[in-house]
Image (cartoon, rainbow, N blue to C red):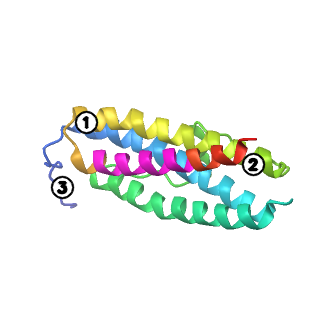
Amino acid sequence: MTKKTKPLQIGISEAHRKAISHGLSRLLADTYTLYLTTHNFHWNVTGPQFNTLHTMFMGQYTELWNAVDPIAERIRALGFPAPGSYAAFGKLSVLPDAPATPPKAQHMVELLTHGHERVAATARDVFKLADAANDQPTADLLTQRMDIHEKTAWMLRALLEK
């Protein structure tokens, strides 16, 4: 006989927790996809800005890697399983996979700029759900993610100016 667990009673309704968890799953998928793309670009960047971009991309993929665990753990704290497969991430993410053939450095920067903007937008969408449910821990996590992605997009855009 298995012991039945009590429903989660943290002051957030199950419906709200489910909606927030689904949104966080989308954010997790976007973050992981952007992590993979950034790491790919770190490995494959070439050209006159090699050293600068190689180092910058390493800082960015490290930050993204460190972001996936808190997002997944927040989903678990809300009582739902966190997605963790390429198939699941492919269905949930709005970001495309990294190009099969590494693009030129300038195009890498453009793709990463767009990626960070999209992840910030995903976080902002989920923030609305967390705010409506009075879910401060999720709102705090999302605020931090928006700040990081918006700053990173700004820094990448600065490289694109002529």
The reply, left or right, for residue 147 in relation to residue 157 is left
Query: Distance from label 3 to label 1 (Cα)?
Result: 28 Å
Is residue 148 or residue 131 the one in the foreground?
148
Foreground: disc 2 or disc 3:
2
Secondary structure at badge 3 equals loop
Query: Distance from label 2 to label 1 (Cα)?
Result: 34 Å
Q: Amino acid at mark 2?
A: Met
Q: Are marks 2 and 1 in contact (CB under 8 Å)?
A: no
Tell me what residue is drawn at x 29 percent, y 44 percent.
139
Instruction: Classify the position of the N terminus by image quarter.
Output: bottom left
Which residue is the extreme one toward the front?
162
Q: Is residue 119 visible?
A: yes
Instruction: Classify the position of the C terminus by image quarter.
Output: top right
What mark, if any, has residue 5 been given in the picture?
3
Foreground: disc 3 or disc 1:
1
Is residue 2 or residue 99 the one in the foreground?
99
Could you tell me residue 92's position as x and y percent? Answer: 54, 39
Secondary structure at badge 2 equals helix
Give the prevailing secondary structure in the magenta stretch: helix
Q: Amino acid at mark 3?
A: Thr
The magenta segment: 139-152
Q: Is residue 54 magenta?
A: no
Q: Which residue is mark 1?
A: 131
| Quadrant in the rendering for residue 52 | bottom right
Foreground: disc 2 or disc 1:
2
The reply, left or right, for residue 70 in relation to residue 41 is left
Could you tell me residue 80's position as x and y percent? Answer: 34, 49
Q: Which residue is mark 2?
A: 108
Tell me what residue is drawn at x 61 percent, y 47 percent.
87
